[in-house]
């Protein structure tokens, strides 16, 4: 039997305190606002000047936004960058569908009730919060911008090396989804 490695997602239930839940909600709402503002800016740039704004140009403007808006400055910079990447992935999918003749859906503005997640693109495991905005410390999560450590319902072990952490709201509950790299996968013999 050959053992291979793959990428796999692990979803865990969070038990935040009231203050922590307010902070998770604040980050989510700010990311939704940034997504909609970036979409508006992209549409206006094309409509008024015929210019297509790329992801790097919009990410470069984040420093100015953070200077003007202290609430945005409190959020980890890579979370904001990932929000803009999410918008540009939506445009890439739109143009890909146009090219192959499928029915395209132009990227839409997101209502706050329909924007349910935000992603930290790096996860650390040593308690120093050096690698990214999320760190695993003794069975709890330390997250940049959220006081204390978050309680996690670990119903199974986390395999491989965590690469990203996505915080997702489903109804009134919060979950964290780790995307792990180098997860061993046992390949079954062919029948």
Image (cartoon, rainbow, N blue to C red):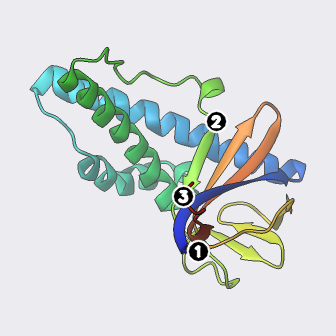
- Extreme residue toward the top, this view: 103
What residue did someone put label 1 on? 1
Residue shown at the point (61%, 42%) measured from the top left: 117
Name the quadrant containing residue 49.
top left
Residue found at the far front of this picture: 191
Q: Position of residue 112 (x, y in %)?
A: 61, 27
> Does residue 140 lie above or below 137 as drawn?
above
Badges 2 and 1: C-beta atoms under 8 Å apart? no
Q: Measure the alpha-carbon separation of dots 1 and 3.
A: 10 Å
Q: Nearer the viewer, mark 2 or mark 1?
A: 1
Q: Are marks 2 and 3 in contact (CB under 8 Å)?
A: no
Residue behind mark 3: 190
Left or right: 79, with 175 as reference point = left
Q: Nearer the viewer, residue 160 or 19?
A: 160
Q: Position of residue 29 (x, y in %)?
A: 62, 37
**Residue at coordinates 21% horizontally, 24% vertically from top-left?**
100
Name the residue: 31% across, 14% down. 103
Q: Are marks 1 and 3 in contact (CB under 8 Å)?
A: no
Using residue 177 as the reference point, say whether residue 90 is left or right of it. left
Q: Residues within 10 Å of mark 2 (few under 14, many from 20)?
A: some
Q: Which mark is residue 116?
A: 2
């Amino acid at each position: 039997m050959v053992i291979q490695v793959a990428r796999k997602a692990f979803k865990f239930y969070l038990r935040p305190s009231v203050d922590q839940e307010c902070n998770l909600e604040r980050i989510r709402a700010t990311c939704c606002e940034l997504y909609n503002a970036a979409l508006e800016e992209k549409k206006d740039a094309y409509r008024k000047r015929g210019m297509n704004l790329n992801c790097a140009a919009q990410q470069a403007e984040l420093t100015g936004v953070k200077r003007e808006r202290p609430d945005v400055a409190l959020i980890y910079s890579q979370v904001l960058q990932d929000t803009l990447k999410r918008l540009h992935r939506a445009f890439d999918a739109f143009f890909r569908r146009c090219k192959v003749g499928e029915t395209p859906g132009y990227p839409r503005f997101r209502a706050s009730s329909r924007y349910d997640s935000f992603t930290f693109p790096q996860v650390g495991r040593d308690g120093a919060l050096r690698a990214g905005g999320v760190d695993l410390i003794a069975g709890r999560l330390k997250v940049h911008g959220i006081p204390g450590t978050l309680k996690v319902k670990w119903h199974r072990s986390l395999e491989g090396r965590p690469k990203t952490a996505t915080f997702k709201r489903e109804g009134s509950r919060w979950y964290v989804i780790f995307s792990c790299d180098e997860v061993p996968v046992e390949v079954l013999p062919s029948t």
